[in-house]
Image (cartoon, rainbow, N blue to C red):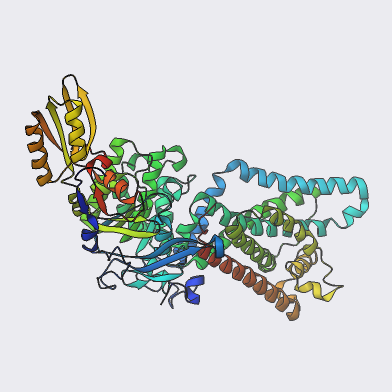
């Protein structure tokens, strides 16, 4: 990249928090019996010979009780294989998984007392049954007496705005409502660890926002442990404490949402200046990472990736070239942009190569 | 341990705790599981009313076709054997219901996206599938009883209906069909499209039910064959369960356990392989 670009190595942060060394797949540095979820070295290859496809390789992480972890990755990154392996629905070639200290491969029934998953979105329920019938049925097959959970089910239905549809067949509900029924039926089984795949899929903006709040409330009130896989970055930012990003079957980032975003905070600035002709702009382009140059009727706006030192060098350079600065805005990329950056290219990068490639947005 | 070497228990998920409930921390036992699964099965059945009614109508229609068509073609001969035909048809609807019921149920769960939820239960996948089998057999007995009643009305005949004997022999007879259904359900989860062979097997039931088990001794050990012969004796000859030869009962029970066990084994192996291939919940 031309110019002085900002290099922020997120991988330095990625080994912290409750996660593992994301670059080596080493065992998470937590007590397997204390963690709500402990995943150590999961690997899975589908097929054999020339057709073998390594879906996941050495995936390790841990989730503390009451923690919400977002699992992100582009299509084919290995998220589904990881989730299904962790749940025992796919038998990995190697690796250990413990749910609340219980080996899910050795004692699946004991482990399933604690964990359930919404893997198929709205297809997770029986559409011919009513909302309440679904909650009762799935509670029963989870070993819970549905009669003793009536109050809890009522509460969940209220929280998810489903109370007035309790006796409506799921097939008569909108897609978003179906999605919420699926979610309620998972949480209605009295689990302490839940996997949610795309929990807000099909929801309108308002419903999505409310669901995110309710999820966070459930976590805070009940100490629920969640692993959320979603392409909706607002879900991840609003609900999750930590983010695991996968690419090419490996964990490339395992860090708190705050730390991850902090790695991008010095992303850059948006300048609006007067007196910039093409020569001046070419000169600045050669020395700095300019992007998004726009002519605004006598003024020029551009963005630049810059840390504080670069910022001052740039303003000095502009002053020397006689530019008059009309305005400066801080530009911060959001999690979506961070995600795209980290999973693009060779898939191994944790370095942020400048604001221009992020296409930052204002906050 | 590594995931590559799961224990036998993890493969089947079978094995209740000593008190009949799961081994730890549950508020409900197998009674709740069975109740919930049976209730759900009946609810889903009645909420597809066209399919439910059509199933009954088709069942009666084909018998009517055989009965009236047979009378036109064979005249008195069909009247002489009508009781046997009714019992055989009754057993065929029972066995078909059990076979197709469990096979379709497993495949429907996979296509609905709910199969994996049934895998992730503290009861284990095996007990849940067996509870489903019980639900399907219960529903099949109910629907086949309706078909039987209509057949008797249609033909104006009466049969002995020693309820305990008919239910016991009927259950043991269709256990083999249930085993085949489980096996095909498991293979369906693994290979997804097996409808050609699955449909073909249904016709094989006719041959098994009419197998000459009195004349060719080894046919008694085939699925359905011994049960069919004993059900004929019970419903047309009034023979009660305790009046059968112990050997006949032993063969009936042995065949039921064998074929149900084999079917379950194939199901467990197929679902384990599906997990290894990562296709358990695919549809």
Left or right of A263, for residue B176? right
Task: From the top left corner, tell me how far across and down residue A254 is, in percent.
Answer: 27, 59
Please name the residue shown 58% across and 60% down the image.
Answer: B190
Q: Is residue A81 visible?
A: yes
- In the rendered structure, the answer to whether residue A81 lies left or right of residue A257 reads right
Instruction: In the rendered view, tell whether residue A135 sits above or below residue B240.
Output: above
In the rendered view, tell whether residue B218 sits above or below residue A57: below
Residue at position x 35%, y 46% in the image: A231
How many numbered markers are drawn?
Answer: 0
Is there any visible trace of residue A288 in the rendered image?
Answer: no
Residue at screen point 32% across, 61% down = A193
Tell me the quadrant of the picture where the N terminus of chain B can be found. Answer: bottom left
Which residue is most to the top? A297
Location of residue B113 in the rendering, given as x and y in whole percent from the top left corner: 49, 51
Does residue A74 appear to the left or right of B184 in the view shown? left
Quarter of image, res A272: top left
Query: Residue B163's x, y, as percent?
Result: 67, 64
Front-most of residues B90 and A224: A224
Q: Nearer the viewer, residue A160 or B189?
A: B189
**As rendered, which of A191 and A212 lies closer to the eye?**
A212
Q: Hey, which residue is sitting farthest bottom in the picture?
A: B246
Q: Quadrant of residue A51?
A: bottom right
Compare residues B215 and A117 and report the one nearer the observer: A117
Q: Position of residue A344 (x, y in %)?
A: 35, 48
């Amino acid at each position: 990249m031309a110019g002085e670009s900002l290099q922020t190595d997120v991988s330095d942060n990625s080994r912290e928090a409750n996660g593992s060394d994301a670059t080596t797949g080493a065992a998470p540095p937590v007590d397997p019996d204390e963690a709500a979820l402990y995943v150590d070295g999961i690997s899975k290859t589908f097929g054999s010979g020339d057709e073998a496809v390594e879906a996941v390789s050495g995936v390790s992480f841990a989730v503390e009780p009451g923690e919400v972890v977002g699992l992100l990755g582009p299509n084919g990154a290995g998220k589904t294989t990881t989730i299904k392996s962790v749940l025992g629905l796919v038998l990995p070639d190697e690796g250990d998984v413990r749910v609340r200290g219980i080996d899910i491969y050795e004692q699946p029934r004991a482990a399933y007392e604690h964990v359930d998953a919404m893997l198929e979105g709205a297809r997770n329920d029986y559409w011919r049954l009513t909302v309440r019938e679904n909650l009762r049925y799935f509670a029963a097959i989870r070993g819970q007496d549905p009669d003793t959970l009536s109050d809890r089910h009522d509460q969940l239905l209220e929280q998810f705005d489903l109370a007035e549809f309790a006796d409506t067949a799921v097939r008569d509900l909108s897609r978003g409502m179906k999605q919420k029924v699926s979610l309620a039926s998972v949480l209605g089984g009295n689990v302490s660890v839940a996997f949610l795949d795309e929990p807000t899929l099909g929801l309108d903006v308002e419903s999505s926002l409310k669901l995110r709040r309710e999820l966070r409330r459930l976590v805070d009130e009940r100490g629920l442990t969640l692993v959320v896989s979603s392409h909706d970055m607002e879900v991840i930012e609003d609900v999750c404490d930590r983010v695991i990003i996968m690419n090419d079957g490996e964990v490339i980032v395992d860090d708190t949402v705050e730390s991850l975003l902090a790695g991008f905070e010095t992303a850059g600035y948006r300048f609006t200046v007067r007196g910039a002709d093409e020569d001046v702009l070419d000169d600045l382009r050669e020395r700095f990472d300019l992007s998004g140059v726009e002519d605004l009727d006598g003024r020029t706006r551009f963005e630049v990736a810059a840390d504080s030192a670069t910022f001052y060098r740039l303003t000095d350079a502009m002053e020397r070239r006689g530019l008059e600065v009309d305005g400066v805005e801080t530009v911060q990329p959001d999690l979506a942009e961070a995600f795209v950056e980290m999973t693009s290219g060779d898939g191994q990068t944790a370095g942020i190569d400048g604001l221009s490639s992020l296409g930052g947005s204002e906050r | 341990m590594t995931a590559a070497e799961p224990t036998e228990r993890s493969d089947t998920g079978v094995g209740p705790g000593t008190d009949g409930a799961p081994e730890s921390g549950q508020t409900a036992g197998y009674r709740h599981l069975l109740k919930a699964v049976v209730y759900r099965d009946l609810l889903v059945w009645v909420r597809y009313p066209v399919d439910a009614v059509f199933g009954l109508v088709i069942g009666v229609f084909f018998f009517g076709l055989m009965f009236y068509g047979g009378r036109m073609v064979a005249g008195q001969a069909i009247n002489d054997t009508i009781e046997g035909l009714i019992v055989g048809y009754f057993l065929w609807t029972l066995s078909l219901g059990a076979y197709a019921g469990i096979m379709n149920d497993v495949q429907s769960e996979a296509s609905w996206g709910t199969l994996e939820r049934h895998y992730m239960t503290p009861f284990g996948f095996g007990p849940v599938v067996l509870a489903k089998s019980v639900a399907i057999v219960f529903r099949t007995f109910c629907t086949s009883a309706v078909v039987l009643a209509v057949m008797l009305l249609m033909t104006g005949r009466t049969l002995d209906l020693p309820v305990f004997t008919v239910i016991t022999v009927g259950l043991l007879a269709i256990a083999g069909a249930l085993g085949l259904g489980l096996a095909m359900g498991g293979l369906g989860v693994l290979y997804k499209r097996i409808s050609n062979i699955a449909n073909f097997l249904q016709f094989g039931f006719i041959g098994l039910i009419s197998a000459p088990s009195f004349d060719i001794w080894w046919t008694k050990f085939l699925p359905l064959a011994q049960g069919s012969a004993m059900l004929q004796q019970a419903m047309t000859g009034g023979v009660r369960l305790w009046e059968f030869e112990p050997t006949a009962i032993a063969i009936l029970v042995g065949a039921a356990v064998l074929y149900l066990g084999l079917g379950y084994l194939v199901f467990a192996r197929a679902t384990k392989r599906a997990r290894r291939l990562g296709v358990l919940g695919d549809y």
